[in-house]
Amino acid sequence: MNKIKVMSFFGTRPEAIKMVSVIKAIEKCPDIAGSVCLSGQHREMLSQVLKAFAVKADHDLKIMKPGQTVTTITSGVLEGMEELFRAEKPDLILVHGDTTTAFAGALAGFYAGVPIGHVEAGLRTYDKYSPYPEEMNRCLISRLADLHFAPTPSNRANLEREATAGRIFVTGNTVIDALQTTVQAGYQFRDPMLAQIDLDAGRVILVTAHRRENWGEPLRRICRAIRRIVEENPDVQVVYPVHLNPAIRSVAEEELGGVGRIHLIAPLDVFDMHNLMARCYLVMTDSGGLQEEAPALGKPVLVLRTETERPEAVEYGTVKMAGIEEEQIRSMANELLRDPVVYNRMAQAVNPYGDGRAAERIVGAILYHFGRGEKPREFQV
Ligand code: UD1
Ligand code: UDP
């Protein structure tokens, strides 16, 4: 029997981190011939992940440009994929999440008549412009996809409410698969700047921010809040691996550069990042992935946004929405830093997002879809 040809397509750091376990599970499956195709929407931040997990790409569209827009990303992917689909003729393309690479990859698959599998399907804020453009990207991918791999039962319920066509499988989130391989006892940091920071010198707040809707003034307010939190709590230090986007770097450096006990460092490789998260006191972020990882590690999260598509850990109490206003962010962080009761209530390890076996279920569902296996048992919280 011919092998099923499955092309994994992605282009940014978080997609890579969350697709690695799927790629590895496909490699082990004798019925599937896997290939890896990159859009190259990210360059250095993507290479970091591929290197850390020893993943080799078969194709790279290399579309990244400084100052790229959602339009240039979309057109670059559509043009590149048309040619590649003609040459490769996959039976299925897998896209991940809500980036413009993922949306354009799914659209290119649809144009070429290639069935589409969507990993991390069904997350919603129901606000068209927040997060922008991710909310609309993932809604549109749901309309295009044939197979929907929903991390949680509530993600499935979102898809069912929208009467989404195609098959839905609840798999857990592949980020938990990744986390189970990266976090190690006695881990030694590889990044030279991180290795120099004395993490025992004070409680560590791990900060990241990159969302498009936070560019400009909201990011400035977030940075000012962080500065005040550090000034008001002498035993606190901040480690902030800054995204390579110049729009983020310039504001972070202007507002926080040279401030005592604030370490602005380059993006960390995923092993360093996950192990730093495991050792920090508190996470403050506008990232999607960190909202899933930190609760699994028992770290409270303040989300620097006004909404989230990941309500599960908010319901469990490990994640709180801190918004994008300086005073609210400052007061919520200070409460957590000063009130052990509030802190301990939040610092519970909860794992509503997965059990480390999402990739195995995704591969099982692909085999089932192509008539080569039993329906996999779904992830239950
Ligand atoms: C993208 C995704 C976002 C995802 C995020 C993860 C879209 C529209 N946005 O946003 O959903 O959460 O990735 O990080 O798909 N850059 C580099 N090197 C890199 C990566 C980026 O120099 O390795 C710089 C480039 O100047 C690039 C800019 O960052 O133009 C912005 O990158 P882009 O992918 O457009 O936006 P992100 O904010 O990273
Ligand atoms: N991450 C990383 N190094 C960093 C910052 C983040 O490896 O310096 C990881 C993080 O642990 C998570 C993913 O990148 O797995 C999240 O990526 P990002 O915040 O860029 O995107 P989002 O999840 O918001 O789409």
Image (cartoon, helix red, strand yellow):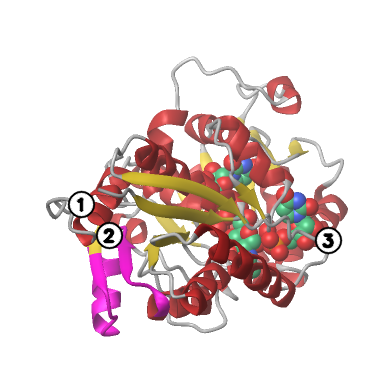
Tell me which numbered mark, 2 or 1, is placed earlier along the sequence. Answer: 2
Disc marking residue 379: 1
Q: Amino acid at mark 2?
A: Thr
Q: Secondary structure at mark 2?
A: loop
**Could you give the CA–CA distance between mark 3 and mark 2, rounded to whole angstroms?**
35 Å
Image height of 34 relative to 314, above or below: above
Residue 70 location, quadrant: bottom right
Classify residue 190 as left or right of residue 92.
right
Tell me which numbered mark, 1 or 3, is placed earlier along the sequence. Answer: 3
Q: In front here: 103 or 348? A: 103
Report the residue marked by disc 3.
Answer: 66
**Could you give the CA–CA distance between mark 1 and mark 3, rounded to whole angstroms?**
40 Å
Answer few, some or many: residues within 10 Å of disc 1's Cα (few below 14, many 20 plus, some between 14 and 19). Answer: many
Q: Amino acid at mark 3?
A: Pro
Classify residue 176 as left or right of residue 372.
right
Residues tagged 2 and 1 counted as in contact (Cβ below 8 A): yes
Q: Secondary structure at mark 3?
A: loop
Q: Is residue 340 visible?
A: no
Instruction: Tell me which residue sits at (24%, 78%) in the image.
Output: 160
Q: Nearer the viewer, mark 3 or mark 2?
A: 3
Q: Is mark 3 within 8 Å of ligand 1?
A: yes
Report the residue marked by disc 2.
Answer: 152
Residue 305 location, quadrant: bottom right
Answer few, some or many: residues within 10 Å of disc 3's Cα (few below 14, many 20 plus, some between 14 and 19). Answer: few
**Residue extent of the magenta highlight:** 144-168
